[in-house]
């Protein structure tokens, strides 16, 4: 469920997020409900195991909108008894006061966008909250929700290994069962990209990035939150079920402006996507009953590439049986000598059941994937 609106656009963000002076929540509630019914009609009402409110900033949604969405999904689909329902939130005081209302609406997992634990870094990242507000929001969220996670961004300009060690140690001291830790990347089309091109923004070099990554693994492992995905750490049983669906190449429905989905149908796997413009999506749903753009059929090569790109991010790696069922050929036949070479060089483990990147391989995962795919 994609909510496309934010209070402001962060300088590193290339997501489909927009700033608007006013939002007609009644219209958006009605549109989401209609789009959910349309999605259910094409999928045959399968069982929903997870729901994720992403954005944008979903904590800007009125709680009535969240309740309407969840009621619409329950009416149009079958909900698993233990369905995971996550909502992303920013830790401003104005948004954290809504936590209890979101919980009453049915949300049972909170993902908090803290991003940093010092005010100078938050200002640099364009965040609207302070570190004091972040700590208060995390405490409030943990008191309301059974499961609470938060995000941090590292490899910021000028950040030293010692700086990150102190910051991450403090973060782990909060005691949550899940932590997402992302390396700052400079994406085209963002304000940071323009600054980097002009030479006004320089991120740490690859050696420092590798050191920061190593410290992340060291401290998270010691705290009992090992990496289950390259940027996500959790105690056993606290992994984000929704995101695991992506990484394991499962099926999901995307609702809202710019939302993407993947569906397995009789004719094969298809990629779905919605109109990107919030106003365009809203108008299409109101006039035609859906904001979906035409499906894209994924041929066997595209499906294989996507499975490798997503699956090797996981610590569990690619399951050989599932891989062969999906692509029609065994792992060794598909990857051939490239796999043998990566194993010999210590970048990959292949035990006959799974293909997994080693710690060394995860540091250069893009190169490992490119080698396997022959790029």
Image: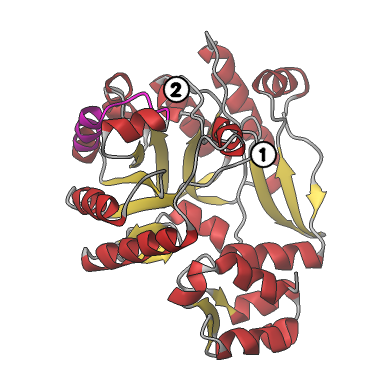
Label 1 to label 2: alpha-carbon separation: 21 Å
Disc 2: CA contacts within 10 A as few (<14), some (14-19) or many (>=20):
many
Asked if one can make out residue 103 in the rendered structure from this viewpoint, the answer is: no
Label 2: which residue? 61
Disc 1: CA contacts within 10 A as few (<14), some (14-19) or many (>=20):
some
Query: Residue at image x 21%, y 63%?
Result: 223
Label 1: which residue? 39
Q: Is residue 101 above or below residue 26?
A: below
Which quarter of the image is occupied by the C terminus? bottom right
Asked if one can make out residue 12 in the rendered structure from this viewpoint, the answer is: yes
Label 1: element kind: helix
> Where's residue 237, x and y in %?
32, 63
Query: Residue at image x 56%, y 30%?
Result: 191
Query: Which residues make up the magenta segment?
Result: 126-139
> Where's residue 210, x and y in %?
42, 64
Coloured how?
Answer: secondary structure
Q: In this view, does 94 lie to the left or right of 228?
A: left
1 vs 2, front mark: 2
Q: Is residue 274 left or right of residue 46?
A: right
> Where's residue 264, x and y in %?
71, 58
Which quarter of the image is occupied by the N terminus? top right
Q: Which of marks 1 and 2 is nearer the N terminus?
A: 1
> Where's residue 101, x and y in %?
31, 25
Looking at this rendering, what residue extends furthest in the front direction? 199
Query: Residue at image x 60%, y 59%?
Result: 250
């Amino acid at each position: 469920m994609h909510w496309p609106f934010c209070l402001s656009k962060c300088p590193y963000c290339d997501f489909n997020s927009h700033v608007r002076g006013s939002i007609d929540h009644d219209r958006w509630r009605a549109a989401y409900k209609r789009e959910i019914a349309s999605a259910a009609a094409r999928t045959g009402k399968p069982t929903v195991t997870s729901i994720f409110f992403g954005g944008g900033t979903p904590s800007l949604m009125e709680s009535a909108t969240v309740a309407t969405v969840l009621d619409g999904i329950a009416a149009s689909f079958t909900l698993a008894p233990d369905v995971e329902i996550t909502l992303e939130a920013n830790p401003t005081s104005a948004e954290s006061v809504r936590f209890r209302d979101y919980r009453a609406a049915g949300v049972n997992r909170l993902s908090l966008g803290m991003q940093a634990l010092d005010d100078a870094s938050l200002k640099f990242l364009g965040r609207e909250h302070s570190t004091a507000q972040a700590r208060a929001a995390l405490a409030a969220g943990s008191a309301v929700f059974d499961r609470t996670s938060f995000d941090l961004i590292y490899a910021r300009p000028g950040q030293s290994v010692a700086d990150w060690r102190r910051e991450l140690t403090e973060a782990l001291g909060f005691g949550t069962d899940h932590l997402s830790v992302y390396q700052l990347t400079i994406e085209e089309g963002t304000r940071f990209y323009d600054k980097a091109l002009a030479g006004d923004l320089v991120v740490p070099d690859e050696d420092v990035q590798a050191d920061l990554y190593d410290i992340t693994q060291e401290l998270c492992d010691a705290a009992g939150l090992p990496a289950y995905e390259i940027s996500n750490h959790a105690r056993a049983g606290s992994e984000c079920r929704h995101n695991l669906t992506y990484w394991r190449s499962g099926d999901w429905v995307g609702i809202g402006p710019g939302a993407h989905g993947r569906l397995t149908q009789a004719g094969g796997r298809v990629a779905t996507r919605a109109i990107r413009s919030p106003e365009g999506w809203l108008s299409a749903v109101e006039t035609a009953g859906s904001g979906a753009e035409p499906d894209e059929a994924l041929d066997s090569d595209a499906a294989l590439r996507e499975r490798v790109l997503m699956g090797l991010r996981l610590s569990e790696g690619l399951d050989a049986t599932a891989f062969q069922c999906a692509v029609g050929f065994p792992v060794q036949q598909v990857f051939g000598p490239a796999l043998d070479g990566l194993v010999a060089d210590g970048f990959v483990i292949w035990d006959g059941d799974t293909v997994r990147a080693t710690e060394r391989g995860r540091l250069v995962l893009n190169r490992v994937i490119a080698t396997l795919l022959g790029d």
